[in-house]
Each structure stands twice: as C-alpha cells, then as structure tokens.
Amino acid sequence: MGAVEKGSEKHSIDIEIDNDSADTSWFTPWRLLGLFCVINLITYLDRGVIASTGVNGVPETCKPSGECSSGTGLQGEFHLTNGEDGVLSSAFMVGLLIASPIFASMAKSMNPFRLVAVGLLIWTFAAIGCGISVGFWSITVCRMLVGVGEASFISLAAPFIDENAPPKQRSAWLGIFYMCIPTGIALGYVYGGLVGGSYGWRYAFLSEAVMMVPFVILGFVMKPLHLKGITNAKNAAGSSKDKADAQTTSIVQDIKELMNEKIYIVNVLGYIAYNFVIGAYSYWGPKAGYSIYHMSNADMMFGGITIVGGIVGTLTGGFVLDKLDSTIPNAFKLLSTVTFFGAIFCFSAFCFKNMYVFMVFFLIGEMLIFATQGPVNFVSIHAVKPSLRPLAMAASTVSIHIFGDVPSSPLVGVMQDHIGNWRTSTLILTTVLFLAAGIWCIGIFIPFVDKDDEDIENPKKSNKTNPFDD
C-alpha cells in the first residue's frame, strides 16, 4: 500500500508539474515587454499623428487682394486659429494629469492589469471620436479622453515591466520600453503624413484605433496579472461605502508617505528640471535652428537628431546601469554624470557657428541626456515600496509635465521676445540641465534602504500562468 500511495503521489506531482509547464508555455516576461512596447508605440504614434502636416494641416490663408486659399487637415476643415490648434496639441495633458493619480489609487483595490485594459478601451473610443469629430470642441474633448485612457497605461506599465524583468536587466528593460517614446512620435509624423495626405486626416485617427483593438481584447481576456504589494480585489471585503472611505484614507496616507520619500522627491525634482529643457527643445528647437543656422529643413534635422539620440541614448543608459549593478546610488551617479556631460555638449553645440559642427555636438549631447530615461524611472520605482509604485509613477508623470515641459515652452517664448536672439535663449535654456545634474548628484549621498520586500503581507506571486484562464 505504501508503495502504491507513493506511486500515486509521484504521479499526482508529475501531473501538477506538467500542467504548470503547460500554463507557462505562452505568457513570458519577454512577451509582456513586447506587448507593452507595442502599446507604448501606438500611444506615442498618436502624439506624432496629431502634430503631423498630413493630419494637423495648415489654416486658411488670405492675401491682401482678398483671394483666399482653403486650409488643409483638421486646421483647415475646422477653421482653427493657431491658438486653438495649440490647445489641441496639449488637450490630452488635461485628461492625463487628472486620471493618472486616480488610476494609480484604484490599483490598490482593483486588478492593475484590468485597469490597463479599461484605459486602453477609453483610449480606443477617444481615437474613434477624434476621427468622427465635427468641430473644435468635440475634438478637444476627445483629445482629453485620449489622455484619460493613456493614464492607466503610463501609471502601471513600468511597475509591471520592472517586476517581470530579470533582476540583472531591469534598467535595460525599462530603457527598451521608454525608447518607444521618441520612436513612436517619429513614426506618427510619417504615418500621419502618409495616411492623412492620401486618405484624409480622419482615417489616421480611425486606423490607429483599429491598431489598439487587439490589445484591448487581450487585456480583458487574459488572466489578470498582479503587482507585488497590491491587494487582490477578490480578497477585498466590506460595503461599498466602507471601501470608498478606506480608499480615500489610503490615497491621503499614500500621498503623505510618498512626499516623505527623500530619494523619490530628489529624483522627481531633477526630472522636472530635465523635462523643462527637453520640452522646450522639442517645441522651439526647429525654429531656433532655422534662425541660428538658416536650416532649410530644420524639422527633419531636429527630428532625425532626436530619433537617433533618443533610441541610442535610452537603450545605452539602461544597459550601462545594469552593467554597473542596478542600485539607486549607481542610478544617481549615472543620471548626474550623463546629464552634466550632455549639458556641456548641448551648450557647446549652440556656441558654434558652423551648422555641421553644431549637429555633431548636439547629437552627442542628445544621446547623453536621453540615457537618463531608464535610470530615472528605475529610481522612481525602487525608491518606494511596491504598493506605492503605481502612485509614484503617476505623480512623477504629473509633476514633470505641470512643472516641466508645460510651462517651459511659453517661458522660453517670453524670454526670446525680450532677448531677440535665439542663440542666447537656447544657451540660457540649456544651463537648466546643469541644475538637473546637480539635483541628481544630491541623490548619491542620501541613505538608501531596499524597499522591494516591504509589502510582506502581499508577497510576489508568479505571473507565469495561462493567460486565458479566469
């Protein structure tokens, strides 16, 4: 009997192992990274599409003689002023800033993976709304909803990637993910120009919505993944009122706790200063280049430099941090070093009068400053305990936009109006990168305690399960 029992037990174990192997056959960390990278590409493709000439178009113009030429794209069809067009380019930011902390707090009581799916569904309907909009206000509301849909993904994707990445490749994986930002925007310029120019601007929005549909479906039918430190919604108990009260209290407590994390605060302050410069570069760069160096194709040149610098720099920064050993002190050392030398190269670039020398120095500078993308997000994730990570990413996103790239473009414009010299204006702007390097340097000296295992009541569970199980 003992032999039979042991044999049966062994057979049972074998079946369990075989079933587990079958369950792990589809969903792997690499597939998760690939899935999130494609979604990231599509969301940032939309940023490029709305700004492309094929979609954005040009407004109606009239000559002094009274002869008028009809505009093109949505600017021409909706008779938008440049001011209204500028609102469209940043309307998504309103939805993003409002919804990011909301989705992050909801992750405490709902499955984060399902929240990503809900956000992508909102994004898809918003993109369709852009394609069928009838005027300025309707497309503005839809652009805000695009930001709402994107908010869940921005807040939750990076923690998922970090948790599923091999321990010695976390920063590299984050670098790969964030590399999709400049790549997606650049593809959006091309895609919007081709589709908008050939079939009309509405089809560019409608077709990008179609691209997102498979990922929305996957998000709802795949087995939900859980983040370490996040409560399983199935285990939540109590009345709706109790849950709402508890969630409100939890949000306030989490924000207070986040504000007490010195490493996180220093990291975000440096990121704000950094994004202040990057935002102004992206908006004013082509115009400054045209004025200083008389570039006939300033858009293409600055776009090309940004794409190459963004891809090479972002990937390199992540891989270098992993080689150094992915720790927060090492991340701060890398952040301060590459930003400092990147600032030197960018500052020097604007000092040269030769356009080709400028391009070489500026490209090197861009590669260095884009090398921060993996490390800076690595710090934002690992400076706080796992249950705070979605909120940390949301707060970081909100902060770098509100205090960084949103005010920088108009402030640089006002400065240029007073100075009247683009070379001087860009040199003054670039000095803010030295401030970012200095702030990140402070982070090296702040004592650090690894918070990966602080949420011991919610230990990390393997995500290697059948993706289509309930």
Image: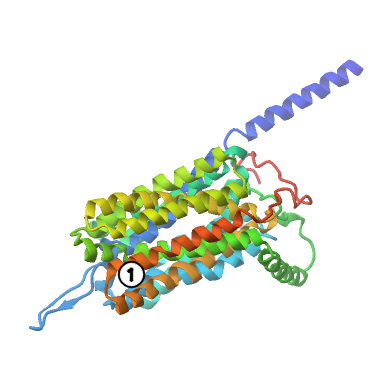
Disc 1 residue type? Ser
Between residue 77 and residue 435, name the one nearer to us: 435
Q: Residue drawn 53% across and 58% down?
A: 154
Horizontal side, residue 379 vs residue 430: left or right: right
Residue identified by numbered label 1: 425
Q: Residue at horizontal 27%, vertical 54%?
A: 358
Residue 325 location, x and y as percent?
Answer: 59, 40
Which quarter of the image is occupied by the N terminus? top right
Q: In x, y percent, where is residue 13?
A: 77, 26
Look at the picture and state if 89 lies above or below 211. Answer: below
Q: Residue at x 55, y 45 (%)?
A: 171
Q: Position of residue 159 (x, y in %)?
A: 60, 51
Residue 191, quarter of picture: bottom left
Whole-percent x, y for residue 243 in the image: 75, 68
Instruction: Say whether residue 106 is left or right of residue 362.
Output: right
Residue 128 image-quadrant placement: bottom left
Q: Secondary structure at mark 1?
A: helix
Taking depth in this image into account, of 206 and 185 the one nearest to the observer is 185
Residue drawn at (56%, 40%) of the image: 324
Q: Nearer the viewer, residue 280 or 387?
A: 280
